[in-house]
């Protein structure tokens, strides 16, 4: 029995965390948050992540990747969440996963090396406005290799060179298609998310030429959604853990009534419950990543557990962060809102906590 | 990540599963069977069965062979917990002795204590009770006032213990007694091993809100105990107690998950029977419980890993307690909320008996109190894990 990260995986986590602490700290994050007209994609950060293999983690070695699994990828996602780091990491990794899972050998050879190296930014468009995250919420139609419709919200569509789009064909079957940024009829509108650590837009397609991933049927759509759910959950537990750690550190020092406020049980008990919840969410994400890597028959349950638990934990921990920092935590100058807004923007992506619980109900009731 | 057990451990699973299949009568596994028995009858049946299990080599799984144990691995203990629950094996009658007293005796007992205590306990010839809580010493255990006065080679003990599991069946009781007159808090306490079969010891049952009487009160009136029957040094009972409580291992989380997950499935079956399974709010309620139970399973694998790596779990066991006890209680709250009025009826239909559900439901209120209440556990997590000031 070994339910833990290996020494190599822990070292990988430290490398990414230390890189962020040294080269892209909260002041740098603030720079991106306050530059609301910028593309939110600092190249120093992106190159650093590429140098560490953080973009290549899931790409097979034959395509210049590291050939690792989701257990390794969630290590990166957690570190990025903890650092509230901006940039199109998740979209790029998921686009590569789509090509790896469903692309032909030729498609893999064409796109994977550039995605692994960070030369091409990728993103995924798997759901339309108001839709569900299970393949039923797709509002793009595919006809003879051309796509029409829309997808929203999409991470970093403005800087993506390659979009993986879920579309339904004339028989109503969902599939995955690759669209290049220069394709005709493709337009992107910035939707101005309140989460300044990301850039989010709506993608419009009007008779846009696309290339179907050869094995990109409904199974591939579901597999990609599951991977998105786990890596998004990993980001959320990173956010949750860091929010809790910062709150505890502050409440150890902040004095009122002549004592540290962290000595009051009203705060202690909330912190203890959050510590348990965040720890369980960390376990759940780790297990879900492993379950997908190992084709565990319980993977569907595991993904839904991780998705709901991580999003609840991050939601709670970041709300508590503002509350237990008191008035300062509500100010623009303080970093609490980076964590709070990131948690709330990400919580509903790839399925909200409620949607994941309904999935669990469908699987077990 | 590697969630498999070793070949040796899987072999153990096969042997145990076979033995359990051959030694558990079918009627024992029917819902409500144990609840239908008189308390004494249930106890004696379980005592006899457990003695047979010990003779077959399926007790003291992780204990050293020299103490009559199997010398098994933490993984085998987890498998044991999982398989016995899966087979609906009867619960042990000597929980507190086996879980707490035995490893403490192995660690600090005298050679005589090791010989006299462990074997008979394992064979269920002696049933042990734990005498810690008192009417005035619950969460504040160091407030114990049961006193022991030295009289020659003996201590003479007077006082009262409460919430004593198996009080009516106990033969001996490991008891926190204030043996230094005038001492306060953690000082001057000794852990005395008192024979309950003597005129100075009287046990009375306490009827619980569930109607069962698993625990009771124990009164000491000039009870005598030889001074040599002190575990650890005289006056160092608090230290002995802390060592003893540290043996609450998290690996049983694997067994707890198996049990609670089965209860979840049983509640789901009732929800379907009563037409509540399609209600979206009920589905959210149930799924919320399942999330916590699955997290308990992952946490148990984490704890088992830590144990196998030889790491000290320390205050992390408080998190384990919070997770399992709150998840279990929430599961039974969901039973009430989802089933609504039908949940409150023992016989909502002529062919439906919800009595066993009510027993679990009401029992679930106790688990966030005993063994350190949730409030005490939250203090421990906050102070010793997170480092918040006292």
Image: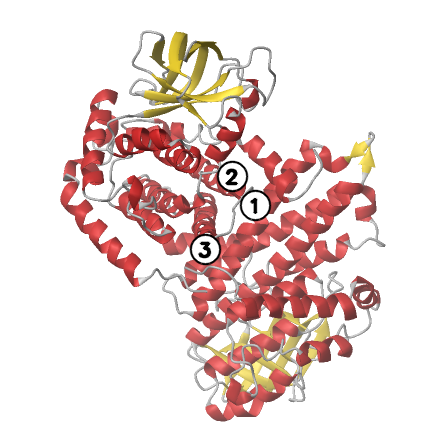
Of residues B388 and A345, the one drawn nearer to the viewer in this rendering = B388
Q: CA distance from mark 1 to mark 2?
A: 8 Å
Q: Is residue A281 left or right of residue A188?
A: left
* Picture disc at residue B322: 2
Q: Which mark is residue B286?
A: none
Asked if residue B63 lies left or right of residue A190, the reply is left
Residue drawn at x 46%, y 59% is A3
Residue B109 spot, x, y in % from top left: 41, 32
Furthest-front residue in view? Answer: B152
Q: Which residue is mark 3?
A: B305
x, y percent for residue B25? 14, 38
Decide which of B278, B29 is in the foreground and name it. Answer: B29
Front residue (pair B244, A26): B244
Disc 1: host chain = A
Dot 2 and dot 3 within a common chain: yes
On what subunit does the disc labeled 3 rest? Answer: B
Q: CA distance from mark 2 to mark 3?
A: 19 Å
Rendered location of residue B134, percent (x, y):
48, 16
The x and y percentages for residue B104 are 42, 34
Residue B58 shown left or right of residue B154 in the figure: left
Say whether residue A172 is visible: no
Tell me if residue B202 comes above or below residue A96 in the rendering: above
Q: Badge 1 is on which residue?
A: A276
Tag 2 subunit: B
Name which quarter of the figure residue B121 lies in.
top left
Tag nearer the camera, 2 or 3: 3
Q: CA distance from mark 1 to mark 3?
A: 18 Å
The residue depicted at 18 percent of the width and 51 percent of the height is: B18
Question: Cβ–Cβ below 8 Å for labels 1 and 2?
Answer: yes
Residue at left 49%, top 31%?
A: B368
């Amino acid at each position: 029995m070994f339910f833990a990260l290996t020494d190599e995986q822990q070292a990988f986590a430290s490398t990414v965390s230390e890189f962020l602490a040294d080269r892209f700290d909260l002041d740098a994050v603030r720079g991106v948050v306050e530059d609301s007209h910028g593309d939110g994609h600092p190249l120093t950060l992106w190159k650093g992540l590429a140098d560490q293999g953080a973009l290549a983690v899931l790409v097979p070695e034959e395509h210049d990747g590291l050939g690792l699994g989701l257990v390794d990828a969630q290590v990166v996602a957690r570190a990025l969440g903890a650092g509230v780091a901006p940039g199109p990491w998740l979209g790029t990794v998921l686009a590569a996963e789509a090509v790896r899972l469903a692309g032909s050998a030729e498609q893999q050879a064409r796109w994977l090396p550039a995605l692994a190296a960070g030369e091409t930014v990728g993103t995924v468009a798997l759901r339309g406005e108001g839709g569900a995250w299970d393949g039923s919420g797709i509002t793009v139609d595919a006809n003879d290799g051309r796509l029409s419709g829309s997808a929203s919200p999409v991470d970093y569509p403005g800087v993506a060179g390659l979009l993986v789009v879920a579309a339904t064909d004339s028989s109503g079957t969902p599939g995955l298609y690759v669209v290049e940024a220069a394709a005709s009829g493709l337009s992107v509108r910035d939707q101005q998310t309140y989460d300044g650590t990301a850039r989010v837009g709506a993608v419009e397609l009007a008779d846009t030429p696309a290339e179907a991933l050869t094995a990109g049927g409904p199974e591939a759509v579901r597999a990609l959604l599951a991977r998105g759910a786990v890596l998004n959950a990993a980001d959320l537990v990173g956010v949750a853990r860091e929010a809790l750690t910062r709150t505890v550190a502050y409440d150890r020092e902040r004095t009122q009534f002549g004592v540290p406020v962290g000595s009051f049980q009203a705060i202690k008990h909330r912190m203890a419950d959050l510590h348990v919840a965040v720890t369980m969410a960390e376990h759940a994400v780790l297990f879900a990543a492993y379950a997908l890597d190992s084709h565990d028959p319980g993977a569907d349950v595991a993904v839904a557990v991780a998705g709901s638990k991580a999003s609840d934990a991050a939601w709670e921990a970041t709300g508590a962060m503002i509350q237990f920092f008191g008035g300062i935590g509500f100010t623009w100058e303080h970093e609490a809102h980076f964590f709070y807004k990131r948690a709330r923007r990400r919580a509903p992506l790839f399925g909200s906590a409620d949607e994941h619980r309904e999935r669990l109900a469908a699987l077990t009731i | 990540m590697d969630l498999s057990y070793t070949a040796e451990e899987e072999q153990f699973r096969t042997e145990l599963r076979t033995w359990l299949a051959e030694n558990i009568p079918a009627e024992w596994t029917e819902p409500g069977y144990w609840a239908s028995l008189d308390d004494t009858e249930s106890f004696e049946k379980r005592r006899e069965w457990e003695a047979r299990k010990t003779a077959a080599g399926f007790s003291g799984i992780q204990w050293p062979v020299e103490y009559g144990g199997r010398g098994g691995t933490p993984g085998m203990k987890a498998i044991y917990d999982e398989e016995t629950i899966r087979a609906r094996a009867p619960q042990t009658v000597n929980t507190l002795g086996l879980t707490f007293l035995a490893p403490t005796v192995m660690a600090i007992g005298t050679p005589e204590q090791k010989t006299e205590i462990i074997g008979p306990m394992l064979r269920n010839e002696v049933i042990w009770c734990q005498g810690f809580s008192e009417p005035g010493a619950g969460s504040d255990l160091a407030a114990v006032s049961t006193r022991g006065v030295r009289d020659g080679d003996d201590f003479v003990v007077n006082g009262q213990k409460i919430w004593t599991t198996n009080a009516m069946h106990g033969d001996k009781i490991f008891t926190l007694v204030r043996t230094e007159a005038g001492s306060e808090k953690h000082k001057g306490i000794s852990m005395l091993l008192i024979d309950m079969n003597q005129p100075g010891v009287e046990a009375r049952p306490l009827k619980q809100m569930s109607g069962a009487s698993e625990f009771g009160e124990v009164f000491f009136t000039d009870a005598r105990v030889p001074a040599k029957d002190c575990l650890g040094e005289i006056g160092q009972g608090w230290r002995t107690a802390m060592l003893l409580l540290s043996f609450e291992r998290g690996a049983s989380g694997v067994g707890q998950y198996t049990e609670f997950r089965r209860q979840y499935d049983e509640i789901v079956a009732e929800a379907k029977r009563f037409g509540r399974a399609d209600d979206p709010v009920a589905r959210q309620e149930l799924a919320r419980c399942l999330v916590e139970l699955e997290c308990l399973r992952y946490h148990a694998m984490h704890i088992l890993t830590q144990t196998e790596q030889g790491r000290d779990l320390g205050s992390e066991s408080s998190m384990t307690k919070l997770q399992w006890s709150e998840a279990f209680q929430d599961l039974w709250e969901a039973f009430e909320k989802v089933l609504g009025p039908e949940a409150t009826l023992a016989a909502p239909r002529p062919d439906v008996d919800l009595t066993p559900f009510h027993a679990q439901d009401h029992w679930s209120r106790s688990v966030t109190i005993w063994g350190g209440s949730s409030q005490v556990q939250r203090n421990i997590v906050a102070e010793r894990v997170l480092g918040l000031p006292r």
